[in-house]
């Protein structure tokens, strides 16, 4: 055997020895996300929180400052089923729970069961945010919490006649201690009270803007602009046959 072949065999032996040593000490890990010992199957976006400091598909941690002090908010799916989907969602601030829901069924309901926390904003001593329960539309609640996790304000039914936050467009604006909300009675810009918006009586108010002002430790709501059905139809370019 010539010298060249000997050198090649030695190199092969070194490589094989290295692979054997590596295989004996390397801990095989599943690269897929696991929780509570279960392989997670939820999609990215099933738990959606804006501006997280740390996050994955089932967890978000974010920090906000209130009165110059850091407040730690955490959002997580938990109580995982054997199929890899969560049964519950929980949100805390400084360890204090401010949102909890059981009975999730993301595997069947898909995005209709997604949990969406957005539009965080600090006003004086409270944190304001919006929570959207799935992607059906008009499923958003305006919340305010204190740093101990107490819900100090929430508003879902803006009035007593199906006026809900119009969450499939830009619907919220903050300015100092005020919040401007865009709300609607029209579903997907088409249906009004179970019928085509074209059938709505003349003069019916179908959308509106509301202003929430935080002062003296409480929120006051004021109607500031109304949009009637004919304004709405014109603005959306809806063609209505035989509308009078």
Image: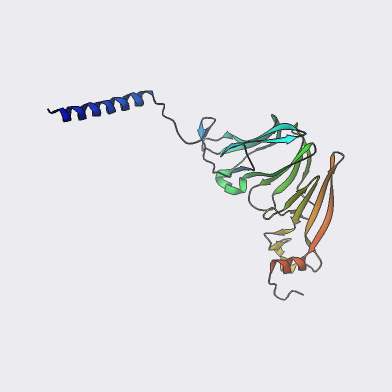
Please report the residue visible at 35 percent of the width from the left and 26 percent of the height from the top. Answer: 22
Position of residue 138 measured from the top left corner of the image (x, y, whole percent): 70, 52
Query: Is 145 placed left or right of 7 in the picture?
Result: right
Q: For the view shown, which residue lies furthest in the left direction?
A: 1
Residue 45 drawn above or below residue 78: below
Position of residue 60 measured from the top left corner of the image (x, y, whole percent): 61, 37
Please report the residue visible at 83 percent of the width from the left and 54 percent of the height from the top. Answer: 223
Q: Nearer the viewer, residue 160 or 218?
A: 218
Q: Is residue 26 visible?
A: yes
Q: Nearer the viewer, residue 35 or 193?
A: 35
Q: For the view shown, which residue lies furthest in the front direction?
A: 3
In the figure, residue 25 lies in which quadrant?
top left
Please report the residue visible at 64 percent of the width from the left and 41 percent of the height from the top. Answer: 51
Which color scheme is applied?
rainbow
Residue 187 drawn above or below residue 93: below
Query: Is 84 placed left or right of 63 in the picture?
Result: left
Please report the residue visible at 82 percent of the width from the left and 67 percent of the height from the top. Answer: 203
Counting the numbered discs, the total is 0
In the figure, residue 182 lies in which quadrant?
bottom right
Quadrant location of the N terminus in the rendered image: top left
Position of residue 244 measured from the top left corner of the image (x, y, whole percent): 77, 75
Q: Is residue 159 visible?
A: no
Position of residue 226 measured from the top left corner of the image (x, y, whole percent): 81, 60
Q: Nearer the viewer, residue 104 or 42?
A: 42
């Amino acid at each position: 055997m010539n010298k060249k072949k000997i050198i090649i065999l030695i190199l092969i032996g070194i490589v094989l020895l290295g692979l054997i040593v590596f295989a004996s000490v390397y801990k095989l890990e599943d690269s897929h996300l696991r929780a509570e010992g279960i392989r997670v199957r939820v999609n990215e976006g099933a738990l959606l929180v804006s501006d997280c400091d740390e996050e994955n598909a089932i967890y978000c941690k974010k920090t906000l400052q209130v009165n110059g002090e850091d407040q730690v908010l955490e959002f997580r799916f938990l109580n995982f089923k054997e199929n890899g989907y969560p049964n519950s969602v929980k949100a805390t601030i400084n360890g204090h729970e401010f949102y909890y829901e059981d009975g999730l069924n993301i595997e069947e309901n898909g995005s209709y069961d997604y949990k969406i926390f957005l539009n965080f904003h600090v006003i004086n001593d409270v944190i304001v945010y919006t929570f959207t329960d799935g992607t059906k539309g008009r499923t958003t609640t305006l919340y305010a919490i204190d740093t101990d996790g107490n819900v100090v304000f929430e508003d879902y039914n803006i009035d007593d006649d199906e006026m809900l936050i119009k969450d499939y467009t830009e619907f919220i604006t903050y300015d100092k201690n005020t919040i401007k909300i865009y709300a609607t009675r029209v579903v997907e810009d088409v249906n009004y009270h179970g019928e085509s918006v074209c059938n709505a009586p003349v003069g019916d108010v179908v959308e509106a803007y509301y202003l929430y002002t935080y002062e003296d430790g409480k929120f006051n709501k004021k109607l500031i602009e109304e949009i009637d059905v004919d304004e709405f139809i014109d603005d959306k370019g809806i063609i209505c046959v035989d509308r009078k």
